[in-house]
Image (tube, helix red, strand yellow):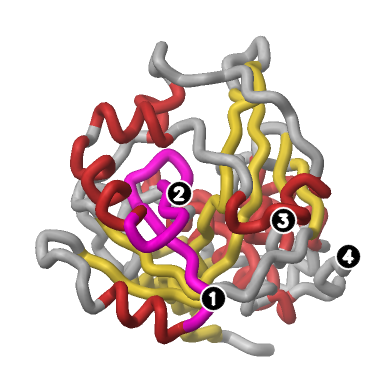
Amino acid sequence: MVRTLNNCPAPAKLNLFLHVTGRRADGYHLLQSVFQLIDRGDVLHFSIRDDETIHRSTELAGVPTDSDLVVRAAKLLQTEAKRQGKVAGAEIAIEKNLPMGGGLGGGSSDAATTLLALNHLWQTRLTRTELMALGLQLGADVPFFLFGRNAFAEGIGEALLPVETPESWFVVIEPGVSVPTQQIFSSTELTRDTKPVKISDFSGAQESFGKNDLQVVAANLFPPIADAIKWLQQFGNARMTGSGACVFCPFKEEQQADAVLATVPPQWKAWKAKAITHHPLAYLLQTKVPQT
């Protein structure tokens, strides 16, 4: 039996657009978005323990162990392992490359990678659908990373359809602020009635499609976001991802991204990333990645 899985990627995502179309009675917002996987992310390392301890060996500033989505994901899957009569424990180390509060889905992606890796190591053999159901208990973005490919998302983000996205390079700027998602969604300034669209609307327009309804609120509350958007917009269709704070702009060629990256003002951390079509760990699932 395999006892370790090292260098497991947890890729970031970008919201190519993000519309808020309504609000449910329970307070959750109804969204439409296209989630784009990119080739930058965190890296996790896993090994089986012979007891039932879930131990995160990496200290993460501001993230207590018990509230870490990685630990919560492991414990959630552990319940299923115990139901199958297996003694399951894990040692987990995290290389954190993505900023917290950046809108890149870092915590959710880490949780999804944890479910994928431990499902394999512990041989719990849950299907993609079963893992996605577990992931939804951790957060609305987690099912996307388990879905395994770029997606048109609806509902609270859990209703997913595969979508083709253009081959792109992205310049991403970290404005240096951490945005609390709840603060953005609870704002009275947030638009909550954007007209619903169809997946074909996006497919016909691609990079120029839609907007991020959360951007205006976040930019007003956190001026560095507005500054980064204004600067990056001189090169193309720049916008914020998720609830912020990161800002991105797509380019067709890597050379274009390199040229812009070289001119980013020094007060910001910036990097480039390439669009990818599938989650790098999709092979760990017994079911195939869904096709269009």
Return the disc, 4 or 3, that comes first in the chain's sequence. 3
Q: Decide which of 61, 101 is in the foreground and name it.
A: 101
Q: Residue at x 75, y 65 (%)?
A: 164
Q: Which of label 2 and label 1 is nearer to you?
A: 1
Q: Earlier in the sequence, mark 4 or mark 2?
A: 2
Q: Relative to 45, does residue 52 appear above or below in the rendering?
A: above
Label 3 neighbourhood size at 10 Å, few (<14), some (14-19), many (20+)?
many
Q: Say which label, 3 or 2, has the lower sequence index.
A: 3
Residue 290 pos. (x, y %): 85, 66
Q: Secondary structure at mark 2?
A: loop
Left or right, 115 with respect to 284, comes to left
Q: Which mark is residue 25?
A: none
Which residue is denoted by mark 1 in the rendering?
252
Residue occupied by mark 2 = 241
Q: Which residues, given as a range, are shown in magenta? A: 234-253
- Amino acid under disc 2: Thr
Kind of residue indicated by mark 4: Thr
Residue drawn at the location 52% of the way across and 62% of the way down = 52
**Residue on which disc 4 sits:** 292
Which residue corresponds to mark 3? 151
Report the amino acid beneath label 3.
Ala
Q: Amino acid at mark 1?
A: Lys
Could you give the CA–CA distance between mark 4 and mark 1, rounded to whole angstroms?
23 Å
